[in-house]
Image (cartoon, rainbow, N blue to C red):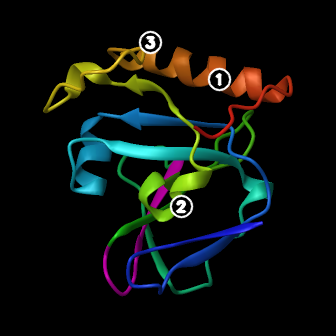
Amino acid sequence: MSTGHCGCGNVSFEISGQPLFRMRCHCTICQRFNQAPFADVVIFRADDVGLPAEGTVDYQSYKAPPNVQRGRCAACGQAAFERFEMALFPKLRMVPAALLPSDELPDVRFDAFYDKRVRDIEDNKPKHEGFWASQRAFLQLWRASRAGKRFSAN
């Protein structure tokens, strides 16, 4: 079991399971929420990550329907925790990679919404442009994780 926390320590959460995968999202919502060129997030099953203490995270929806609740630390304002809850899908948690121990991070698997990027990323990771290609990449890795395939740390 490990612990994730924001920079000021106000938001903390326990992780009891392995990550499903890690991705970078370049959509304009992630750019705005993370106040960065992209979001670097690690995806977990909801049951594998304990919710931060009540009142430590201020959640907001950026688009209807509110499938993703994005949360910032109530004290320092850092992007801290995201809840993905959509009908017919499992509940997932997205945690900024910067909040997790670096030795436990899996490799980035792909870039989503790369057509919205504000800067290029020079690596060999797949770059998916547009909504459908980005969603397909996410769903493929999610399905692989359901089949028991895990993506290990570096």
Compare marks 2 and 3 and give the one earlier in the sequence. Answer: 2
Q: The residue under label 1 is which amino acid type?
A: Leu
Residue at the location (33% across, 70% down)?
78
Location of the C terminus by quadrant is top right
Marks 3 and 1 sit apart, C-alpha to C-alpha, by 13 Å
- Marks 3 and 1 close (CB-CB < 8 Å): no
Residue 76 among those drawn in magenta:
yes
Q: Nearer the viewer, residue 94 or 18?
A: 18
Residue at the location (30% across, 34% down)?
27
Q: Nearer the viewer, mark 3 or mark 1?
A: 1
Label 2 environment density (alpha carbons within 10 Å; few <14, some 14–19, many ≥20): some
The image quadrant of residue 142 is top right
Give, as a single range, the part of the protein colored magenta: 67-77
Location of the N terminus by quadrant is bottom right
Compare marks 3 and 1 and give the one earlier in the sequence. Answer: 3
The image quadrant of residue 60 is bottom left
Residue at the location (63% across, 40% down)?
153
Q: The residue under label 2 is which amino acid type?
A: Leu
Residue at the location (20% across, 29% down)?
117
Q: The residue under label 3 is which amino acid type?
A: Ala
Q: Which residue is mark 2?
A: 100
Secondary structure state at the residue bearing disc 3: helix
